[in-house]
Image: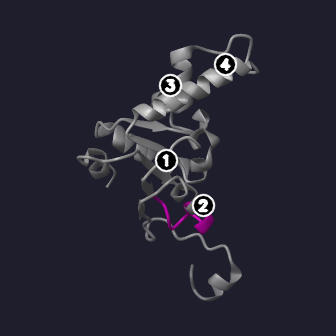
Amino acid sequence: ILLAWARSPGRQGKILATCDSNIGVDNLLDGLVKLGVRVIRLGRPETARADLLQYCADEMAIKKIGPAPGGEGNKAHKEAVRNQVNTEINRCEVVCCTAVGAGSGILERHEFPFVLVDEASQATELTTVVPICRGAKSVVLLGDHCQLPPTVSTDLAKECGAE
């Protein structure tokens, strides 16, 4: 689905690919990289697999502009990193992050008409709404209930057999 969207002639806008878990995001990212899709991963780099760090937005930005002079509290450097991350987002076809991570302030200037939520059966309803609120016009919710059971968080739903 993501490759078809990315290669769709005349596609207008970026693609947001999310998962409920960081492992799921890494799996999406890895698959897209292998297919030659221009992709970036948002979120804390320490949550990503080591072999995928080169696709993490913060790592890409720091590689381009260098480490913070005088330590991490440097406001000018933080702003430069933020601007570089936005530049990297603008260059990619697909942005990967957790569903909750799609609410990050770094995405406030971006709209994503194409949104895919993997592990949708694991996510709560509110979690899946976060990426959809980023300007979605086409949405795909995926989840293999045989691989991971659905997340059921209310007693009433459990009593009705939703687990």
At mark 2, the secondary structure is helix
The part of the chain drawn in magenta is: 118-128
Structural distance between the alpha carbons of marks 1 and 4: 25 Å
Q: Earlier in the sequence, mark 4 or mark 3?
A: 3
Q: CA distance from mark 1 to mark 3?
A: 21 Å
Horizontal side, residue 10 vs residue 99: left or right = left
> Which secondary structure lies at badge 3?
helix
- Residue type at mark 2 is Thr
**Which residue is denoted by mark 1 in the rendering?**
111
Label at residue 60: 3
Confirm whether the magenta stretch covers residue 162: no
Report the residue marked by disc 4.
77
Instruction: Tell me, yes or no, whether the two marked residues, 4 and 2, touch with CB atoms within 8 Å.
Output: no
Q: Which of pointers 1 and 3 lies earlier in the amino acid sequence?
A: 3
Magenta stretch secondary structure, dominant: loop
> Is residue 128 positioned above or below 32 on the image?
below
How far apart, in angstroms, are the residues tagged by discs 2 and 3? 27 Å
x, y percentage for residue 131?
53, 55
